[in-house]
Amino acid sequence: MALEKWAYDSLERGDESVPYLESFLWESRSVAAAGVLIEIAKHYQRLFGGPLLPLLGIAQFYEWDLDLVENRDFGRMTQSFWSDFVGDWARKIAAEWHAMPHRRLLFRDLVAQLLLKTPPVERFVELSIASWIAAPGAAEDLDLQCLAARLSRANYRAPAEGKDDSDWAFVMPPDLDRAISERLRESEAASQDSGL
């Protein structure tokens, strides 16, 4: 939290904290550190296209971020447990910190928007996807296939003339859509068979 707060304050003041963040990226061996850098870049998205670009190349980060964003409300519930031991001021600060708007944004969606506008980011993500897909077992990993599809320009329809650049529409490839439907049918059938 301290590093994240320092980065926000520094970037808001216009201080040159970017070299420190880049150094932290390359010198750290911690997944938690990568998570903090992703949160910082969600707030200052230009960092994804610059010094924090390497974060876009790790498939697992997208999955972890999805889990974090989807389960963030659970964190607020557990926060109420320990908040009985601190004052109102600490509860207020923690609530504001966890309610920052960028914490609701998905890393995957931000990267997709960025690659549609930024050719170097698109190329980097393309190369990353190629290495993910080449890994053993990737062909059977439907979640990875969905992520790769979501991060491929080929699966986006350009906005109509006169529309905002943010109106790109994602279109799931038909074969992947069928595979997802099949997985859902299998999951439903298994649930019924087990009596759930």
Image (spheres, rainbow, N blue to C red):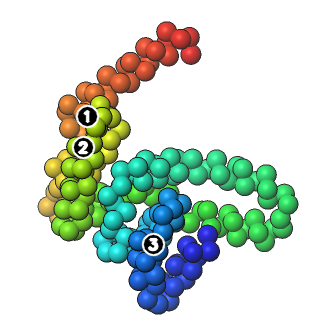
Q: Is residue 25 above or below residue 57?
A: below
Q: Earlier in the sequence, mark 3 or mark 1?
A: 3
Q: Which image quarter is the N terminus in?
A: bottom right
User: Which residue shows up at 36% across the image and 55% down it?
Assistant: 58
Label 1 amino acid?
Ala
Q: Earlier in the sequence, mark 2 or mark 1?
A: 2
Q: Earlier in the sequence, mark 2 or mark 3?
A: 3
Q: Which residue is mark 2?
A: 133
In this rendering, does residue 116 appear at all?
A: no
Label 2 amino acid?
Ile
Give the alpha-carbon distance from disc 3 to disc 1, as whole Å: 33 Å
The circle drawn on residue 180 is none
Coordinates of residue 33 in the picture (x, y in percent): 51, 65
Q: Is residue 161 above or below residue 46?
A: above
Give the alpha-carbon distance from disc 2 to disc 3, as whole Å: 27 Å
User: Which residue shows up at 34% across the image and 60% down it?
Assistant: 56
Residues at marks 2 and 1 touching, judged by CB atoms closer than 8 Å: yes
The circle drawn on residue 139 is 1
Q: Which residue is mark 3?
A: 27
Coordinates of residue 86 in the picture (x, y in percent): 83, 65
Label 3 amino acid?
Glu
Task: Determine the secondary structure under disc 3.
Answer: helix
In the image, is 71 to the left or to the right of 63?
right
Q: Which image quarter is the C terminus in?
A: top right
Q: Nearer the viewer, residue 180 or 7?
A: 7
